[in-house]
Image (tube, helix red, strand yellow):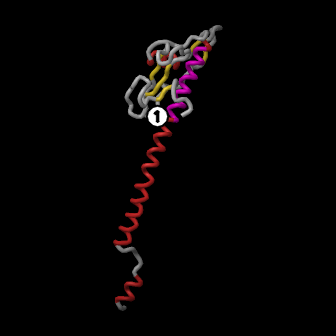
């Protein structure tokens, strides 16, 4: 069998072809990954806003069952109170307001304050997440809260 015929029968890729495909895949990945990272950050912020709304709903349900009074105290005390079954005015047991301790998309606990000192004349509690940087900036900076940026 001649050499030219042996080359024609060999089926495979040369090193140059493999390197070229890897280079193309690298370029595509370099273009796509930054877009995915930005999308993940937006998704985390939206998920955190939803979790804040759920926490806010739980304290509003508590207030309805307690003559319009929102729970007061440190975050840990309020969350513990909302996790415990309660009783209505007739002494019947009611389900807990929360199933589990609320956390943001970065697995950090929420901050809670009532009376609300963040907004003048506020009637609802302030609830916020420390945001992507995981540093509590008292509701400012990149923190995600329930009193500003509504609808973003």
Give the residue displayed 56% in from the left and 21% down from the top: 58
Q: Badge 1, how many Cα within 10 Å: few under 14, some, many 20+?
A: many
Residue interval drawn in magenta: 46-63
Quadrant of residue 122 within the rendered picture: top right
Indicate the secondary structure of the residue bearing disc 1: loop
* Residue 83: image location, x then y, percent: 52, 20
Number of marks present in the image shown? 1
Q: In this rendering, is residue 131 above or below 96? A: below
Give the residue displayed 49% in from the left and 13% down from the top: 115
Give the residue displayed 49% in from the left and 39% down from the top: 42
Compare residues 71 and 42 and report the one nearer the observer.
42
| Residue 52 lies in the magenta-colored region | yes
Give the residue displayed 52% in from the left and 35% down from the top: 46
| Residue 88 lies in the magenta-colored region | no
- From the viewer's perspective, tell me whether residue 46 is left or right of residue 18: right
* Residue 88: image location, x then y, percent: 62, 11
User: Is the C terminus in the top left, top right, bottom left or bottom right quadrant?
Assistant: top right
Q: What is the chief secondary structure element of the magenta stretch?
A: helix
Outermost residue toward the bottom in this view? 2
- From the viewer's perspective, tell me whether residue 63 is left or right of residue 105: right
- From the viewer's perspective, tell me whether residue 43 is left or right of residue 135: right
Outermost residue toward the right in this view? 90
Residue marked by disc 1: 105
User: Is the N terminus in the top left, top right, bottom left or bottom right quadrant?
Assistant: bottom left
* Residue 118: image location, x then y, percent: 47, 18
Compare residues 40 and 100 and report the one nearer the observer.
40
Q: In this rendering, is residue 52 above or below 2? A: above
Outermost residue toward the front in this view? 120
* Residue 111: image location, x then y, percent: 45, 22
């Amino acid at each position: 069998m001649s050499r030219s015929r042996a080359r024609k029968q060999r089926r495979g890729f040369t090193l140059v072809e493999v390197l070229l495909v890897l280079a193309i895949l690298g370029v595509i990945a370099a273009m796509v990954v930054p877009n995915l990272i930005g999308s993940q950050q937006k998704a985390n912020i939206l998920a955190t806003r939803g979790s804040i709304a759920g926490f806010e709903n739980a304290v509003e349900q508590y207030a309805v069952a307690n003559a319009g009074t929102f729970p007061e105290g440190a975050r840990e005390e309020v969350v513990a109170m909302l996790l415990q079954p309660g009783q209505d005015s007739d002494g019947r047991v009611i389900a807990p307001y929360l199933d589990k301790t609320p956390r943001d998309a970065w697995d950090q606990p929420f901050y809670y304050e009532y009376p609300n000192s963040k907004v003048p004349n506020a009637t609802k509690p302030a609830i916020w997440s420390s945001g992507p940087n995981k540093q509590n900036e008292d509701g400012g900076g990149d923190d995600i809260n329930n009193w500003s940026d509504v609808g973003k």
